[in-house]
Structures are given as structure tokens and as C-alpha cells.
Image (cartoon, rainbow, N blue to C red):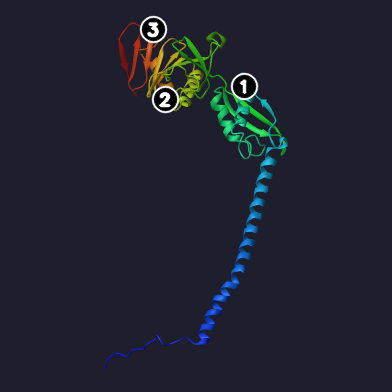
Amino acid sequence: MGPKIIDLRNKKPSRRRVHHARSVFAGERRSSPLRARRRKVRFAILGALLIMLAAIAYGVHWTASIPQMRITHLRVEGAHQVSESEVSDHVRTMLAVNSWRYIPQDNIFFYPKREIEESLVTSLPRLQSATLRRASFLSTELEVSIKERESYALWCQQEIRCFDMDEGGFVFAAAASTAAHPSTTYIFSGGISSENPIGQGVAPDHMDGIVALLKRLEETGYRAREIRIENEQDFSITLERGYILKASYGAEINNLVRDLGLVLNSEALRGTEGDLEYIDLRFGNRVYYKFKGSVESSTR
């Protein structure tokens, strides 16, 4: 039996179905004005929010920019060798940077405290530290408290140009003259190849040990006069007694001083200290020494 066929050409939809379809489309047409009104309300709310946010943003900017909210005075404490104007000018310059910012750089609550402190120490090598603070919550005066480096020794370039150096080996200023320093001042050389040593460190990884050795030598009567940084492993010390002590970084301080005393009191060197050119303590139990005008010798 073949497939059955239904002819839909003469079939007409019932009135009920046509009426239902028309009612659906009519409902859609009736609801479109409601949606339009809702969109207008949403846009109005959004616009109001944007205006309110813009007003708040402008209010914050205006409040942050009024004179009562900005640093207007500077006071520098602790300046001796460094001039107060040099410090205050540097701070004012940094506060004036990016003056177009939404919140000004010199706002009393948002000024770059740590950045200015670090910049002062970097830009003015004579400063060891700098601290910024305000006296009260709404104070517009900024107090800049600085601590200057103290000269521990001189670092000299072939005894022609000398510079002040602190106990950590940091070279921070040109020395007026060697005569302006007491005769007990240590004189360092070597360790810096630059023509301008200011802002650089002399043997920064070993300076603590060198300073401790100098102190120990002085306590035992072997005061040093000059210290030369030879290379990354060795250094030498010229003692006031007229001869040189050669040593290496990392050596135990008490052992060095003890070995020096033992060598000087040994049979080979006893009573000849004035003729010595150097004593070399870089090789453990084997000590090398040299008299002025003679060849190098060794002892155990």
C-alpha cells in the first residue's frame, strides 16, 4: 500500500488559532512603549550616578589641592656640613614633580615620604640618613631630620687628592687637606678605580673586618698608619713602626695579631724590627718577611 497524502492547500486555520496569533503580536506591540520607558529610567539613573561620581571625584581633587591640605613650610634639622638650603631645595623639587597629578605630590597625606628620604641620601652623599615627618595630623610643615656621615679615615689618590670616608668604607666628600685632619687619622688607598670616588665604597664586603683588625692592632701596640686595598683577596697595612703587614680577607683577627707577635719575637727577627720592610701573613703557618735592601725570607 502506498503512502497516504494530505493536501493542505485547501485547509484554512480555524478562527480561534488566527485570533490567538493576532493577540500575541498585538501584545508585543503594546509592551514596546513600556520597555522604552524602562530604558529611559535606566539611562537617567546611570547619568545621575555618573554625575554624582564626577562630583565626588572633583570634590576629592579640590579638597586635596587647597592650601590647607598641601605642604607649605619645610624645616631642616641636623645640618652641619650640608647646608639647610641644599636639603630643602631638593625636597621642594621632588614635591613639585608631577604637579598636574589628580592628588598633588605635596599633599600632606600623600607626599612620597620614602622616595624623598631615599633620594636625599642618594643625591647628597654626605648624608647617612634622612627622615621626614609632620608635627601633627593637619600640619602643613614638613620636618626633615638628617644625619650626616662622620669621617673615620681618608681615602687618597696617590696622596694628591684625599676624600673623607666613613667607618663603612663609603667615600662621601672631598677633604680640604690632609693637614686639617689629626695625625692619628688612617689613610686608605686602592679599591676604587674611578677618578671621582665620591659615592663609592672601599672594600664594602670586607671593611668591617679591616676596621676590627685596626682596632685590635692598636690595642696591642701596633697602630696602623696606612691601609692599601691590593685586590679582591689581599690588603696591606703600614704600621707606625715603619714596616708593612700583608694579610688576606677572611683571616681570623686574633690569629693575625698573635702570629705577628710570635714572628717579631722569634729568633730570626728579634731586635730587628727597625730594619723590616714587610711581614707577610697570608700563607697560614708559613710567614714570609723581608728586610730593607735584602731578599725575601720565610719562617715557621
What residue is pinned by disc 2?
255
Give the residue type at disc 2: Asn
Pinpoint residue 6: horizontal percent, then vertical percent.
Answer: 36, 89
- Local packing at callout 3 (Cα closer than 10 Å; few below 14, some 14-19, many 20+) is some
The C terminus is located in which quarter? top left
Q: In which quarter of the image is the N terminus?
A: bottom left
Quadrant hosting residue 101? top right
Q: Which of marks 1 and 2 is in front?
A: 1
Disc 3 to disc 2, C-alpha distance: 24 Å
Instruction: From the viewer's side, name the closer residue of 101 and 74.
Output: 101
Q: Is residue 205 above or below residue 54?
A: above
- Which residue is painted at 53% across and 86% down in the image? 16
Say whether disc 1 or disc 2 marks the residue closer to the N-terminus.
1
Query: Looking at the picture, how far across and down is residue 200, in whole percent?
Result: 48, 23
Q: Where is residue 265 in the image (x, y as percent from the top left)?
A: 40, 15
Q: What residue is disc 1 on?
A: 86
Query: Could you tell me if the residues under marks 3 and 1 are in contact, i.e. CB atoms within 8 Å?
Result: no
Per the image, label 2 sits on a secondary structure element best described as helix
Q: Name the residue under label 3.
A: 275
